[in-house]
Amino acid sequence: MKPYFLILIFCFNLSVFAETKTIYEICQPEIATYCKGIKPTKARILQCLKERGKDLSDVCEAAQSALSDTMKTKSQGFCKEDVSEYCRWVIPGGGRILKCLFENESKISNQCKVVLNET
């Protein structure tokens, strides 16, 4: 069997695995190590894990990436105006937009707060 085919199968299995279990289950060791005391919402855990990107297991990295894509889609719909108003100078990547939204949480719209506080 060709090596690139095995890699493709491995990556596909990681993404399927990441979709069937929650980020809390998949990344439990990383969350316990790096995210102690963080409010257990998807956005806050995601932001914490993004800051530790190079320290994540492959499985956790895949789960973090899948959740990141999901959260990005939701936030673009519900937090677009808030990002434009409060985070327009923030360079995207590494959880910086999420961090900015958390820093401005008292000012952002209720619909964006719902996305940030989803469990």
Image: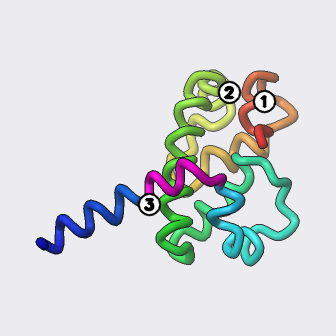
Magenta stretch: residue 19 in it? yes
Residue on which the image places disc 1: 114
Q: Residue at 71% x, 69% y: name it.
A: 28
> In the rendered image of this protein, does residue 97 appear above or below residue 2?
above
Horizontal relation, residue 91 to residue 97: left or right: left
Residue on which the image places disc 2: 82
Q: Which mark is residue 91?
A: none
Query: Which quarter of the figure has residue 71?
Result: top right
Q: Residue at 57% x, 50% y: name it.
A: 20
In the picture as drawn, the residue positioned furthest to the left comes out as 2
Q: Nearer the viewer, mark 3 or mark 1?
A: 3
Other residues around mark 1 within 10 Å, as few (<14) / some (14–19) / many (≥20) = few
> In the rendered image of this protein, does residue 69 appear above or below residue 47?
above
Contact, CB < 8 Å: mark 2 with mark 3? Answer: no
The number of numbered badges drawn on the structure is 3
Residue on which the image places disc 3: 14
Q: Nearer the viewer, mark 2 or mark 3?
A: 3
State which region is magenta: 14-22
Quadrant in which the N terminus is drawn? bottom left
